[in-house]
Amino acid sequence: MTEKLSEETRGPLLQPLLEAGWEMVEDRDALKKTFVFDNFVEAFGWMTKVAIWAEKWDHHPEWHNVYKTVDVVLSTHDVDGLSALDAKLARKMDGLAE
């Protein structure tokens, strides 16, 4: 079962993500980031790669795509906040975007 991040684990898991451009969502225990690609095909290709990992881990992002821009919000609905799965998926998204 997935658990909400404790105060002890939040810093070590979230700080590297915040340094990599992720931000906390105001009024919600969630992370957000905007990814901008060269064109729609690259954005959609990245989303497809992320979708495969999200399905494998049974943890799906909230996202919105317009042309070459993808806005992402990560939160674990089962725990009403951030979990280790959110940090894991954020790291994967960053890696796939490089």
Image (cartoon, rainbow, N blue to C red):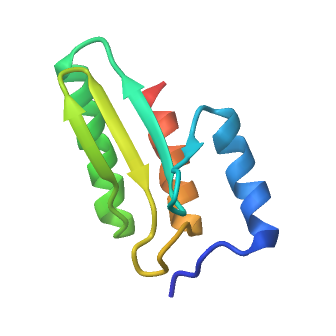
Residue lying at 53% horizontally and 51% vertically, measured from the top left: 26
The residue that appears at 23% across and 14% down in the rendered structure is 39
> Most extreme residue toward the front, as rendered?
27
Residue at image point 52% right, 81% down: 2
Residue at 59 percent across and 32 percent down: it is: 21
Q: In the picture shown, does residue 96 fall above or below 67?
A: below
Q: How many marks?
A: 0
Residue 33 coordinates in the image, percent (x, y): 47, 37
Q: Is residue 55 left or right of residue 6?
A: left
Q: Nearer the viewer, residue 2 or 77?
A: 77
Which residue is situated farthest in the right direction here?
Answer: 8
**Residue 79 percent coordinates (x, y):** 49, 80
* 41 relative to 69 in the view: left or right: left
Residue 47 versus residue 20: which sits nearer the camera?
20
- Image quarter for residue 36? top left
- Compared to 68, does 56 lie above or below? below
**Closer to the camera in the image, 90 or 5:** 5
Query: Where residue 57 sits in the image (x, y, percent)?
Result: 39, 66
Q: Residue furthest top?
A: 38
Residue 91 occupies quadrant: top right
Residue 65: image quadrant is top left
Horizontal arrangement in the rendering, residue 40 relative to residue 61 (left or right): left
